[in-house]
Image: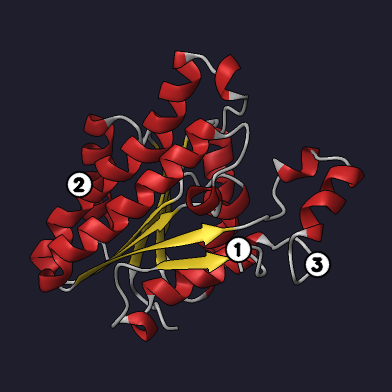
Amino acid sequence: MKVENKTVLITGASRGIGKSIAEEFAKNGANVAFTYLSSVEKGQALEVELAQYGTKIKGYRSDASDYASAEQLVTDVVADFGNLDILINNAGVTRDTLLMRMSEEQWDDVLRINLKSVFNLTKAATKPMMRAKAGSIINITSVVGLMGNAGQANYSASKAGILGFTKSVAKELGSRNIRSNAVAPGFIETEMTGELNEEQLKEWTKSIPLKRAGQAKDIANACLFLGSDASSYITGQVLVVDGGMLM
């Protein structure tokens, strides 16, 4: 799963799964561009942290859900790195509540940040990838996009939308040697899941054949595979990383 000297752009990489993806690619020789919306200090701290692996690293404070910002971001990355080989659309939020209590704003926020951002970055990134006649697009979806989840109608809809988008892009761009795949995490230990109490954690793990939560690195490894030439004949697929939960 070699990615040496390839340039990867990862959205929403300041923490959790995104940060783990950035670290794994840097460890394996990729030049890493990443976005964040937190403080500039946090972005700079991650740059320093990833620089230890000896590849080119640069963070960009950019809102993936804004189309003009996404276009400018890709332009800047290509200017700074010379190319763009891999795009990982990871930025996302939750606004969980039951449908009867869900506001229009909660619905719109999640669809805009989770789904529209994937459209924005993918459309912008296809231009340099088409010129290079190569590229790998990896979209982070979720198992709830496949099975739904009470209290997450907005989040589930956004993640299901990513699945249809991923497959459509794979069909459109396959002839240009640009691949489009998705990774669907199951129950992964992150800062968000860290807010659950012990009883809630037990309930979740009951439904997982491996009887444990996944780690952010599990998702990072799946992305590393799909970004590398080891997956050169794989496109339009959804790689479910969930410990068997959906079996």
Question: Quadrant of residue 210 in the image?
Answer: bottom right
Circle 3 or circle 1, nearest the eye:
1
Is residue 56 placed above or below 117 in the rendered structure?
Answer: below
Lower sequence index among marks 2 and 3: 2
Q: For the residue marked with disc 2, what is the amino acid?
A: Ala
Q: Earlier in the sequence, mark 3 or mark 1?
A: 3
Which residue does the image show at 80% across and 67% down from the upper left? 211
Residue 134 vs residue 6, the one in the foreground: 134
Relative to residue 121, is residue 239 depicted above or below?
Answer: below
Which quadrant holds residue 200? Answer: top right
Camera-side residue of 103 and 28: 103
- What's the amino acid at mark 1? Leu
Q: The C terminus is located in which quarter? A: bottom right
Picture coordinates of residue 109, whole percent (x, y)? 44, 24
Residue 67: which disc? none
Residue that carries the numbered disc 3 in the rendered image: 211
- Quarter of the rendering occupied by the N terminus: bottom left
Please report the residue visible at 9 percent of the width from the left and 64 percent of the height from the top: 131
Mark 1, other Cα within 10 Å: few <14 / some 14–19 / many ≥20: some
Mark 2 and mark 1 residues within 8 Å of each other at the beta carbon = no
What secondary structure is marked by label 1?
loop
Residue closest to the eye, 122 or 205? 205
Q: Tag 3's secondary structure?
A: loop
**Residue 141 x/y as whole percent:** 46, 52
Give the residue number, with chain letter if any, for mark 1.
246
Q: Is residue 245 visible?
A: yes
Other-residue count near label 3 (Cα within 10 Å), few / some / many at <14 / 14–19 / ≥20: some
Which mark's residue is nearer the viewer, 2 or 1? 1
Alpha carbon of mark 2 to alpha carbon of mark 1: how far? 33 Å
Q: In this figure, which residue is indicated by the disc labeled 2?
A: 124
Label 2, residues with CA under 10 Å away: few <14, some 14-19, many ≥20: some
